[in-house]
Amino acid sequence: MDSMYEILMGLPLFNGVSHERISEIVGMAKFHFLKYLPGEAIVNAGDPCTHIKFIISGKARVHIANSDGRFRVSQTLDAPDVIAPEFLFGKATRYPCSVEAVLPTGILQISKSDYMRILNLDQIFMFNFLNILSMNAQKSVDGVLSLTSGSLEERIAFWIIALTQRGGTDIVLSCRQRDLYSLFGVQRTSFIATLESMRERGIIDYDQSEIRIVSRRDLLDLLSTSQEE
């Protein structure tokens, strides 16, 4: 029981839960512990999201791309984290991303029906889940607005933030430069100048086909500074 308690207490959606509540959950819900080898698929894009999946050990690489694959954002999620929780409910309940193990990786998954019972057991569970959903919804709104009103730096930052999770690391945007400056509606010289400025300040690195994020926190700080000004 102690090891189960420690695993659940370490997960973001179970923060602040008492030992007694954990004991109740263990008795009422089915927990599936899965192991994946490096390179093995955990989720394929388009799979139905029927379970909530927590990373409890190892690392997973997440890829999300447009329909023709020319634009792709990749990130690494570490334990403890949760894979695309906002797609468990709503109209679109299929994963928009593919996920593969980077190291030997442990996944704890709980069925949607069991997780709904957990959410109804205590307001803390519900608050944690709603808080994650709210943060994801708010960043999407900011991202849409930035396409028309923000600077190019802000627009690049919003795209990355909207397509990655809070705990994401080793973030890479893969796309040809000419497709990117066309996408953002700017001239090549302005686009390169912006990338150079961001690289000089240690926010990103880049080449002809990739923009590599040095720190997602730096992008959030950039956005916060812009909003304060």
Image (spheres, rainbow, N blue to C red):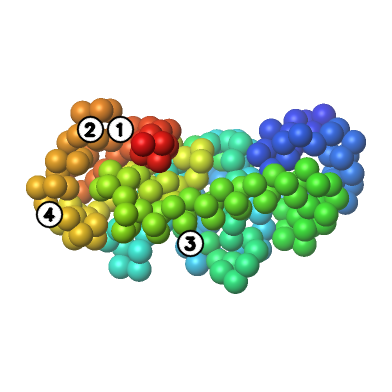
Name the mark on residue 199.
2
Identify which amino acid the numbered label 4 is placed on: Gln
Of residues 110 and 214, which is closer to you in this image? 214
Q: Which residue, as the protein is rendered here, is positioned at the far left?
A: 189
The spot of residue 99 in percent (x, y) is 48, 52
Image quadrant in which you'd find residue 187: bottom left
Helix, strand or loop at disc 2?
helix
Residue occupied by mark 3: 96
Spatial distance from mark 2 to mark 4, Cα to Cα?
A: 19 Å
Badge 2 local density, few (<14 within 10 Å), some, or many (20+)? some
Spatial distance from mark 2 to mark 3, Cα to Cα?
A: 29 Å
Helix, strand or loop at disc 4?
loop
Spatial distance from mark 1 to mark 3, Cα to Cα?
A: 27 Å
Name the image quarter holding the N terminus: top right
Badge 4 local density, few (<14 within 10 Å), some, or many (20+)? few
Residue occupied by mark 1: 203
